[in-house]
């Protein structure tokens, strides 16, 4: 009987972020008779994939919140690694080098492969930045491999150290444009004849939803037959809803909540608006282009790796909301939605391609 390689993935939680989406795409695609994923989390409130993971043979373990319970977390992770000798690979995912406890302890317990994987290009909180830049000096002592979702994410996390870019692969087939799916979703939300501007992402400062709403407000001035579809959830949801009420456009904005039919929602949109303040990659931009959807996104802060087709346009955040709105309206003129499968695969973003390379890496260990 073939021995299965179990990989311990360490991250905050399993919510609706891009890192989690990539990991789950990878987990679904990898040969689970050869490689299995387990998850060490520090947030029990954010675990939307639990049922699916357990069905696929994965295990989920919880530790105390970090940095709130940093010392307790340290002892719990140490105890866990001491008791679980089956792991030869620890794969840590992060937006900064704030949390390197598992890597330090993995080296202490002589775990052969210790991977730090960068998924972002900035940290907003000052204390996180201080820890990040201090830990950048130490990270090589505790890791065997450095991964990043883009060149920018790698440079932010690791500086001049050598790292490997691992594309955030997607299941391309799911995103092939379908007129049938488009009609179904537009009927569900009663937006059959509307211009639909959409965004998918957590309601956090990084995603810049407040600016997005201002842009949409300008779009409405020139096209009253427009609606804004916001997919996701997060800490700023109440604030955004208050802003929308103040602008008196409640009947023009749809909050879908967290959905598991993202490919179908993208079919229903006409423009994907993504004015993030910073991104490690922005996997949803790859998904939107795979759905043959025109995208307007932030210039210079969204990595160049998202430029996989002529469907994407980059606009500076220094430009006015009126200019952003004009870009949306210009892009929304009738265009043909064509199949993008070959283009996405040729750019290296098929999850089958990515999972094959990652699996070979794990198996070598």
Image (cartoon, rainbow, N blue to C red):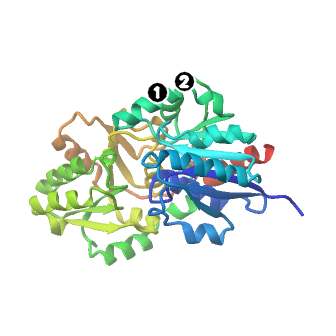
Q: Relative to 27, say whether 347 is above or below.
A: above
Residue 183 on image: x %, y %:
37, 74
Q: Which mark is residue 90?
A: none
Q: Residue furthest right?
A: 1
Residue 121 on image: x %, y %:
43, 36
Residue appearing at x 23%, y 43% in the figure: 324
The residue tagged 1 is: 133
Residue 207 can be seen in this image: yes
Is 141 left or right of 198, judged from the image as shown?
right
Residue 340 can be seen in this image: no
Task: Work out whether residue 174 or residue 240 is closer to the camera in this orientation and state it.
Answer: 240
Q: Which mark is residue 137?
A: 2
Contact check, label 1 and label 2, Cβ < 8 Å: yes
Instruction: Estimate how packed mark 2 is, as few (under 14), some (14 to 19) or many (20 or more) residues with alpha carbons within 10 Å.
Output: few
Is 331 left or right of 48, judged from the image as shown?
left
- Quadrant holding the N terminus: bottom right
Q: Relative to 171, say whether 94 is above or below.
A: above
Quarter assignment of residue 326: top left
Residue appearing at x 26%, y 60% in the figure: 237
Residue appearing at x 49%, y 56% in the figure: 13
Residue appearing at x 34%, y 33% in the figure: 126
Residue 316 on image: x %, y %:
28, 35
Task: Work out whether residue 20 or residue 327 is closer to the camera in this orientation and state it.
Answer: 20
Task: Work out whether residue 258 or residue 365 is closer to the camera in this orientation and state it.
Answer: 365
Quarter assignment of residue 361: top right
Q: Secondary structure at mark 2?
A: loop
Instruction: Estimate how packed mark 1 is, as few (under 14), some (14 to 19) or many (20 or more) residues with alpha carbons within 10 Å.
Output: some
- Measure how far apart labels 1 and 2 are at the Cα level: 7 Å
Residue 208 on image: x %, y %:
28, 47
| Number of numbered callouts drawn | 2
Is 329 left or right of 360, judged from the image as shown?
left
Q: Secondary structure at mark 1?
A: helix
């Amino acid at each position: 009987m073939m021995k299965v390689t179990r990989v311990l993935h360490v991250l905050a939680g399993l919510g609706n972020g891009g890192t989690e989406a990539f990991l789950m795409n990878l987990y679904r695609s990898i040969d689970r008779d050869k490689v299995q994923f387990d998850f060490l989390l520090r947030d029990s409130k954010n675990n939307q994939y639990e049922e699916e993971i357990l069905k696929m043979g994965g295990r989920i373990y919880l530790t105390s919140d970090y940095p709130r319970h940093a010392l307790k977390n340290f002892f719990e992770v140490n105890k866990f690694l001491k008791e679980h000798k089956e792991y030869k690979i620890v794969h840590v995912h992060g937006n900064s080098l704030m949390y390197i406890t598992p890597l330090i302890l993995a080296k202490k317990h002589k775990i052969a492969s210790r991977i730090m994987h960068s998924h972002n290009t900035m940290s907003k909180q000052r204390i996180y930045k201080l820890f990040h830049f201090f830990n950048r000096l130490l990270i090589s002592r505790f890791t065997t491999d450095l991964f990043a979702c883009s060149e920018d994410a790698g440079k932010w996390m690791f500086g001049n150290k050598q790292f490997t870019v691992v594309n955030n692969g997607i299941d391309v087939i799911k995103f092939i444009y379908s007129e049938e799916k488009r009609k179904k979703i537009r009927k569900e939300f009663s937006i059959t004849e509307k211009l639909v501007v959409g965004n998918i992402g957590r309601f956090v400062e990084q995603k810049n939803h407040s600016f997005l709403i201002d842009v949409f407000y300008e779009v409405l001035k020139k096209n009253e037959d427009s609606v804004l579809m916001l997919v996701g959830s997060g800490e700023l949801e109440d604030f955004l809803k208050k802003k929308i009420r103040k602008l008196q456009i409640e009947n023009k904005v749809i909050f879908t909540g967290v959905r598991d039919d993202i490919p179908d929602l993208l079919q229903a949109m006409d423009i994907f608006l993504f004015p993030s303040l910073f991104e490690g990659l922005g996997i949803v931009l790859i998904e939107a282009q795979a759905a043959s959807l025109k995208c307007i996104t932030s210039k210079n802060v969204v990595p160049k790796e998202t430029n996989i087709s002529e469907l994407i346009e980059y606009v500076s955040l220094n430009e006015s909301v009126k200019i952003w709105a004009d870009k949306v309206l210009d892009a929304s003129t009738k265009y043909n939605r064509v199949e993008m499968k070959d283009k996405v695969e040729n750019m290296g973003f098929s999850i089958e391609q990515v999972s094959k390379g990652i699996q070979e890496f794990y198996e070598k260990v």
